[in-house]
Amino acid sequence: MQLCWCRANRAKHPCPRCLVSHEMLDCLHQFFPLRSSEAMRNVVERARCAPTAAQRDKLLMDHGLHDVPHFMWNIRFSDPYLSFIYDLLHFLEAGKWGHHLWSLTLWCTYSINSHYRMAKFSRWRNLKHINDLATKDFTDGQTHLDILKCIVYILCEILPPKSTLIPCIRALLKCRMLLGLRVMTTSRQLVVQQCIEDYEKWCKRVSENYDKNFKFPKQHYLIHALDDVRLKGVLRNGTTRTGEGIHQEVKQHYGQTNKRNTEAQQISIRDEDQEVVARTRLLIDDFFRRASQTAELSDASSDTDATNQEADNQWIFGSPLQYSDSRSYEDLHGGNNPIYRALDPRLREFLHSQFPDEYLTYEATIMASVFQCVYIAYQSKDDWTNAEDILRCNSNWYNSGPRYDCVLFNSDQPGVACARLRSLIRCQLPSGRVVDLAVVQNMKPSKWRPKTSWDGCVVFEEEVDLTFLLMDFVIRGALLAHAQGPSNSHRNFHYLVDVVDGDMFLRVLNAIGHVCN
């Protein structure tokens, strides 16, 4: 805004990219005349030739300008108005959501214990877990983004039926997920345009129901987002998130001081010390990780073929428990844990169905190792680079109760196939073959929907029976949020959280009928 030398946000034409009037800032389907160096220079020259000061000021105010020539007007191949780029952090995460819709959400849920539901929300890597949602003021954009990703699955359980606020927030979140992609193809741009239209439609309904005014500049800036993508590439090229990250580090250091005379308490030295500790910790963790992998390979089998087979896998098991045979696991844990009840006969039946060439007699011993963690590598649909999920399968994760993460897997059924991990087992057959599999509870797609549904709402019903799943069929991890479900059912229902990252969003988007390659 300052670089373009335009008037402030309350001006008649506050946008530095176009000449939209203040009364039309909430209109996202109509395009307005764009600013250019030549056009704005002509306006200033005409204003200086005006016969009176009142006419001069009126002409300048009608175009949102000051009576000052811009220094970049005389520089070849420069346009200060094209330097303005849509910033996801300040315009969307901390702007439309953090300063407007989030405030409205807090007002709507003031008398409801929404923070309790947020504290019970499932954990996920790179997604901040917030316990005191409604009792603290959040200022950083990353926290607002994490709240935005989770809030729809909480509001649908507590707001009145057919609430217009939930689809509005969901439409804004879809815009954020698509505009935050690392690669923007033509099909993705078409979906973004549709999401912007849906967002405008729901904003009008929210304005009618909650008396919310959407006539502010950051609401209008969304209309220029796609043009910025076409002219300058994906929006992460102009993001301010990288530079703003230092605020979170300084905030952590400030919390370790007495809040007075902080410079004397050497905040900069604390930052240097933490950087040294972090680098040292990375080296130590990498050393022990490599040593652990080497020990597991040597203990599991000395067979070269088995070692090569594991090296080609897209997953790595971690946090091993013990190494024994399948009958010992059944005898030791089968009485108290349904996962290992009748483990040996069920395991033999499954392995025989998957590997008919394996001759498994009753006397044959199947050695097994149980793990509590798995690293899954996959190719991201966002930018087709390698990515990784870390999934837990632990009965008491850090003394905070059980944590059994979920996975997406390949299935012959249409849509998205999901299952909950209950155990990770590596089997060594008498022939020397090593088979990695998981004991899972399958998620059956449900036709039930919450009292306020949204576009892309996917609900699963968790089955009670335990089955085996080969790790070869696992695609990546998945995050499920608990749903209340129908009142006459005793089973667990879950929402599929499709906004954990761009890859998951595109997978679910394509699975429900959209074409977004």
Image: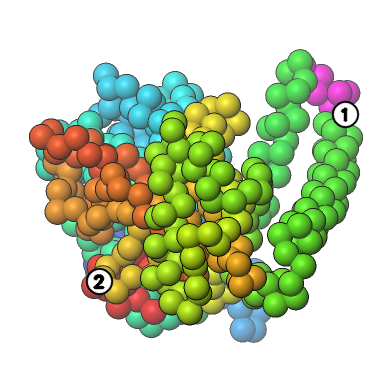
**Mark 2 or mark 1, earlier in chain:** 1
Distance of label 2 from label 1 (alpha carbons): 58 Å
Numbered disc 2: secondary structure = loop
Q: Where is residue 491, by image quadrant?
A: top left
Q: Nearer the viewer, residue 43 or 145?
A: 145
* Residue neighbourhood size for the residue with mark 2, other residues' Cα within 10 Å, grouped as few (<14), some (14–19), many (≥20): few
Numbered disc 1: secondary structure = loop
Residue drawn at x 53%, y 27% is: 400
Q: Position of residue 235 (x, y in %)?
A: 52, 67
Whether residues under marks 2 and 1 lie with C-beta atoms below 8 angstroms apart, the answer is: no
The label nearer to you, 2 versus 1, is 2
Vertical arrangement, residue 10 with respect to residue 366, above or below:
above
Q: Nearer the viewer, residue 269 or 301?
A: 301
Residue drawn at x 28%, y 44% is: 464
Q: Amino acid at mark 2?
A: Pro
Residue beneath disc 2 = 414
User: Quick check: 137 left or right of 28?
Assistant: right
Q: Where is residue 398, by image quadrant?
A: top right
Residue drawn at x 25%, y 59% is: 456
Residue segment shown in magenta = 260-266
Q: Nearer the viewer, residue 91 or 66?
A: 91
Q: Position of residue 250 (x, y in %)?
A: 72, 35
Residue beneath disc 1 = 266
Vertical arrangement, residue 341 with respect to residue 265, above or below:
below
